[in-house]
Amino acid sequence: MEPIKVTAIFDIGKTNKKFFLFDQELKEVYKVYHRLDYIQDEDGEDCESIQALTQWVRQTLKEALSLPQFLIIKLNFTTYGASFVHIDQMGNPVAPLYNYLKKYPEDILAQFYAKYGPAEKFSQETSSPALGMLNSGLQLYWLKYAKPDIFKKIHRSLHLPQYLSFLFTGKIVSEYTSIGCHTGLWDFAKGDYHHWVKAEGIDKILPEVVDTTTSFAKTFDRHSMSVGVGVHDSSSALLPYLTSNSEPFALLSTGTWAISINPFNDAPLTLDELRKDCLHFLSKEGRPIKISRLFIGEEHKVQIEKLYVHFQLEKGYYKALSFEKERYDKAKSKTCKRFRFEYLKPEVYGLTQAAATDWKGFADFEDAYYSFIHELTDLQVASLSLVLNSSTQVKKLYIDGGFNANPIFVEMLRDKLPGISIETTDFALGTALGAGMLVND
């Protein structure tokens, strides 16, 4: 029997590493899910092992190439952003894959903004809220001044999607979606790298910028295929929706972060929006797209673990819950906030939170969980509103990623956004699918 021609996609999240094969209709026909343990960087802080990730990616593709029922003809990559792999002239990593949650040294940050700030001016120019290591361009500045011995070894710094592509093509390139995700590298008004990049000589270690749809013909293990240059995950998640919609829409892409994306809003950022973690991404064509971010996946993870411990329940209990209007009405009727967030800061949006979580006041797990999601969705609406307020009226919102399977979260959003039609989508593979579409254009 003739093997099925397929597109292979690596979809690398902070938690889950996924590999998919899609047929020529871009339907999933094969998948692998994997998790990798963190290691410590030289400062003793958690980070992804670039060696383990490299090994897993190479081995996974090798195994897929040996499957007789499939013929891989295309390959692409999508990964989380704000992460660089620094390589020497031989293409070997010379530094850890630093975690974007690592603390940025205050003295070096002050030095940077003294040269190129003030901070809010710089944030407006680069459409990047001041986020420390999450402004991945500033990681390069930090390496130059805090770790000069490592910096001297760097031949090129590759965004993570482009590093994975490089493993198979040997091509050292960059592309817009990775450059544009709150890196602090791009001057959105000029449509070019910000002047600090050249002033510091950082441009010498940054690769040539190519179109996100670029691919290279390569052969591995006697298999010929077309290999894409990779794409930032949130930008990739948007692509299936853009191709299937003629009317304006917004997307809430959920996972560790909830990213609110309005591809029809390219309005300049105000300082108030920047303070609320609103920014621009670059589309695959290099056009600004307004987005806002909320760290709800990590917040949910921490709070749910506390709830399981408090109520002595097995992990996964919340996943069996369906939406009950009575419980929601009860949560809404509470005049005082009941939760203290671990990461989220409601005050930034003009909202409040409890001084401490009201553990004694909860009747049961459901009572606590409904209150938590009620307070969480209030924040989510505030974050969404930052991108929905545009000259182009959006009447449809898609939710994809992990939270689209949470009926309590979805129904509360429906109640709080009455003028908008909310659809949960089956693009649970939206991120991988978008990367697949880029090499099948």
Image (cartoon, helix red, strand yellow):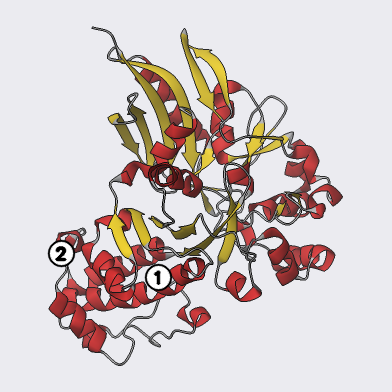
Identify whether 332 is placed above or below 77: below
Seen at 73% across and 62% down, the residue is 125
Q: Residues within 10 Å of mark 1 (few under 14, many from 20)?
A: many
**What amino acid type should be assigned to the residue bearing mark 2?**
Leu
Q: Are marks 1 and 2 in contact (CB under 8 Å)?
A: no
Can residue 313 be seen by looking at this rendering?
yes
The image shows residue 136 at horizontal and vertical percentages of 64, 52
Whole-percent x, y for residue 423 in the image: 29, 57
Front residue (pair 113, 89): 113
Local secondary structure at mark 2: loop
Residue named by callout 1: 380
From the viewer's side, name the closer residue of 409 and 58: 409
The N terminus, quarter of image: top left
Residue drawn at x 69%, y 66% as measured from the top left:
124
Residue 356 or residue 390, whichever sits in front: 390
Query: Which residue position holds label 2?
Result: 321
Mark 1 or mark 2: which comes first in sequence? 2
Image-quadrant location for residue 116: bottom right
Rendered location of residue 41, percent (x, y): 57, 48
Question: Relative to residue 181, is residue 421 depicted above or below?
Answer: below
Q: Position of residue 61 (x, y in %)?
A: 41, 23
- SS type, badge 1: helix
Which of the two discs, 1 and 2, sits closer to the camera? Answer: 1
- Three-letter code for the amino acid on which mark 1 is drawn: Gln
In the picture, residue 368 is in which quadrant? bottom left
Q: Residue at x 42, y 31 (%)?
A: 9
C-alpha span from label 1 to label 2 = 21 Å
31 relative to 275 in the view: left or right: left
Task: Please rate how many residues cluster around mark 2, counting C-alpha atoms within 10 Å: few if below 14, some from 14 to 19, many from 20.
Answer: few
Q: Is residue 412 left or right of residue 394?
A: left
